[in-house]
Amino acid sequence: METLTSPLAGLRARGIALGGAITVYLLLGGGAVFLLVGCLQSTRFAQLTVSGLAVGAAYGSLALALVLIYRATHVINFAQGELAMATTYIAYQLIQWGLSYWEAFAATLAIAFVLGTALELVVIRPVQHRSVIAAVIVSVGLFILIDGVVNWIWGGGIRFMQSPFSGSYDLGGVNIQHLYAGMLGVVLGCVLLVWALFRFTKLGLGMRAAALRPAAAALAGVRVDWMLALGWGLAAVLGAVAGMMYEPSQLLLTPTFMQEALVYAFAAAVLGGLESPGGAVVGGLAIGVFLNLLAGYLPQVVSLEVPFAFAVLLAILLVKPSGLFGRREVSRV
Amino acid sequence: MALLTLDQARLRFGGIVALDDVSLAVEEGSIAGLIGPNGAGKTTAFNAITRLYRLDSGDVIFDGRSLRHTRPSRVVRLGIARTFQNLELFPRLTVLENVLVGAHVSSRFRRERDVRRDALETLAAVGCAEHANRPAAGLPFGTLKRVELARALAAKPRVLLLDEPAGGLNHEEVDELAGLIRHLRDERELTILLVEHHMRLVMQLCDHVHVLDFGKTIASGIPAHVQRDPAVIEAYLGGELAA
């Protein structure tokens, strides 16, 4: 009877404990020192690190999108990468129609926000209350649907999209391409804006409250359903930023160009702890640098990057399932 | 006039009738108690009033208006705020942020700085101002109970539903809490309905007591009468009330 009287019992059952934070910071600090020393020793290492960080920022942004939705609903959105791909095509189309790159960029972010919110309202919300797995399956369906729609509209062929950044500059003998510096700056800037939204605004506070304790948030006056929809909108925006910035580093625009990135974003999100937004970004940067150095120094493994990402994923899940910044979940039976 | 009324509320979970035609009325400005043994349906009644549960039949009427089709997030806007038996604070937010979530209901056209100042004042009113910038997780239970009370107060409600406010407190703290609740009622012109096991608090504080057992009303009246009611003594198996 007592369990029946409390609809909040399920929410309470997820106890929270902190993992060994000091070890994690030592590990990250060690990694940073290693990268710094490497960069000072070798210009090639430095260049690989910078491009790795840039690509990693895109993984991190996509991982952050996954984490935002996971935190609020425990749903892994498998369609996140395809959504990013589709919005990149929209940006491509807007540029074809004559908009400048940054006009198209801004318009695409707005479109992504509306699209993400609408998807939550139309296809996710009806199944959300039934079970998490139902929503996950719907997201897999969305993956296929978006892929199909993009192939139908734009075809499966290769397209070219200009990068807003060209040229390079010299930093102490290291040749840094504007492409990567710009990518890093724009993605991290957008991530920072999203962080500020969550940290400093009324809306952000409502979204955090809704994600932590939905029932209590509702009774404190928060429109939890709207917060979830807006969360999908924001996630789609982060994905769009990742897609548009990631595309030039891949040289070509194809309907499959975000599929590898999604795998890396998964690895990044899990590395960060799945519930930690900061962890997702750090995880993305780490995976980006790791894979870039790996491919740079061991060219024979270039085609093995995806299996390596899976190996990272598997290793984290086996050794430390809570990731770097996650909280260990203790389920009360 | 009654500000909050449960009118023949009926709710079942599978084979269990959690609320069996429960009717109760809370007079404006009064402090009413809802008591009964474990599993009697007290928290269920709170969940029905705040629309977390949908009644099978019957109605909740607040200020002359039916809440049958009101969504939970609207209930607090209408003027009913609550606390929870087992605390439902947002663990990773700071104490102040927790209170701000409550405050934002009533702050649509106000400057954020004023809202923050009010939230801090509310925290001070329950004696928790010094914890404002700490994360809620990790503070002692008694403190968190007060923070949750502050979150409810910050919404500037007309009715406050308190679910076991004295849970986990010692004798001295219970007396202090009674004083605080009475003070808040007077100062903020609140109407209060509280679920409580702590009989001393109920008898000390309540103008009216409603007793549930297995989802049914078994007694209702002023504390002194209810205390002597044979059905109530029976329900508590000659426990606390008989003494």
Image: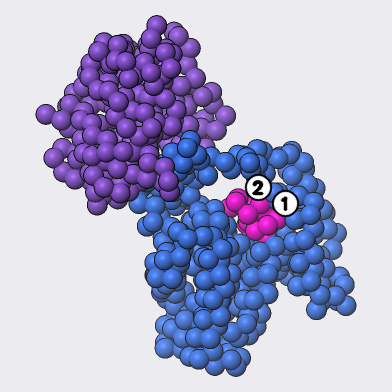
Chain colours: A blue, B purple
Residue type pointed to by label 2:
Gly
User: Which x, y percent locates residue B193?
Assistant: 29, 27
- Which quadrant is home to the N terminus of chain B? top left
Q: Is residue B206 magenta?
A: no
Of pointers 2 and 1, the one earlier in the residue sequence: 1
Q: Is residue A243 visible?
A: no
Horizontal relation, residue A230 to residue B60: left or right: right
Q: CA distance from mark 2 to mark 1?
A: 8 Å
Q: Amino acid at mark 1?
A: Pro
Q: Is residue B39 above or below residue A239?
A: above
Above or below residue A88? Residue A116 is above
Question: Dot 1 corresponds to which residue?
Answer: A321
Q: Which residue is mark 2?
A: A326
**Farthest left residue?**
B1
Q: Residue at x 50, y 91 (%)?
A: A152
SS for dot 2: loop
Left or right relative to A137: residue A109: left
Q: Which residues are magenta?
A: A268-283
